[in-house]
Structures are given as C-alpha cells and as structure tokens.
Amino acid sequence: QVQLVESGGGLVQAGGSLRLSCVVSGRTFSSYAVGWFRQAPSKEREFVAAFRWSGTERSYGDSVKGRCTISSDNAKNTVYLQMNSLKPEDTAVYYCAVTAATRPLPSATMYDYWGQGTQVTVSS
C-alpha cells in the first residue's frame, strides 16, 4: 500500500502563491510517477502536473502551465507543487496521486493511489 498526505492548502488572494506538499510513504513501486490533480465543486477532476520520481520528465495542464512547478525532495519522500499568480478559478481541492506507470500521465484513471486532498481557495 502507498499512503499520500497532502498539506499546504489555504486561503490566498488572487495573484498570490502557495506551495503544496505531498508526503509519499509505504510500499512504492520501483519506478513510478506522481501527479497533482484538482477538483472544483460540480466539475471533473482536472490534471495539474506530474513527473516521474527520480526522473526529469514533467508535464503540466494547460490551465496552469507557466504558473506551477512540480518538484521533489527525495530525502523527505515529498513532492511539491509551487503555484504562483493564483486566480479565483484555481480554487479547488488538490490531490496528489501515484501511478506505477513510468510516464507522468495526465489521466486520473491511470493513478492507483490518492491522498485525501487539500483545499485551495483563491479570493478575488
């Protein structure tokens, strides 16, 4: 089993920044990818960013490209999502997820384990 715990969400004004964290623990795969997704009320889960653990390949959703950066601290088994220039439409619950696939996939259905999520609210 893989456990994922997100933190770092909160209330921020438009134009501000937040850094979300996701601690990955448990029995992870020998090679895997970690993704961030978000879901706003009455909307489908949306891809935000993903990368292959211990790799260099990264991918970003169109709505956040240029404003978000995904990174990791291997010593802490933690994945970060730095979000800048936040907009009210970024308001959502943000989830991190792990997939055994070796590519940073944008499809939520390809991810096997999910955290509980952290709420991000951007005020105008």
Image (cartoon, helix red, strand yellow):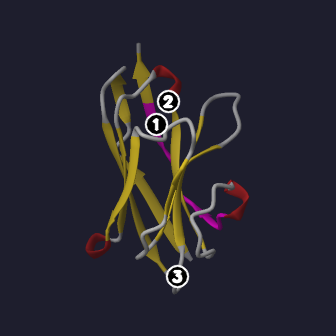
Residue marked by disc 3: 31
The span from disc 2 to disc 3 (Cα, nearest Å) is 30 Å
Label 1 neighbourhood size at 10 Å, few (<14), some (14-19), many (20+)? many
Q: Is residue 21 left or right of residue 36?
A: left
The span from disc 2 to disc 1 (Cα, nearest Å) is 10 Å
Quadrant location of the C terminus? Answer: top left
Instruction: Name the residue at 51% across, 80% down.
Output: 28
Q: Mark 2 or 1 closer to N-term?
A: 2
Is residue 103 covered in magenta? no
Q: In this view, does 8 lie to the left or right of 30?
A: left
Q: In this view, does 39 lie to the left or right of 25?
A: right
- Give the residues in magenta: 111-120
Q: Is mark 3 on a helix, strand or loop?
A: loop
Please tell me in which quadrant of the rendered image residue 42 appears.
top right
Residue lying farthest top? 124
Depth check, mark 3 against mark 1: the one in front is 3
Residue lying farthest left? 75
Instruction: Name the residue at 57% across, 64% down.
Output: 104
Instruction: Give how far across and how far down residue 37 sits, in percent.
Output: 56, 48
Q: Is residue 78 among what the camera can see? A: yes
Residue marked by disc 2: 90
Q: Is residue 116 among what the camera can see? A: no
Instruction: Give how far across and how far down residue 40 sits, in percent.
Output: 60, 31
Q: Is mark 1 on a helix, strand or loop?
A: strand
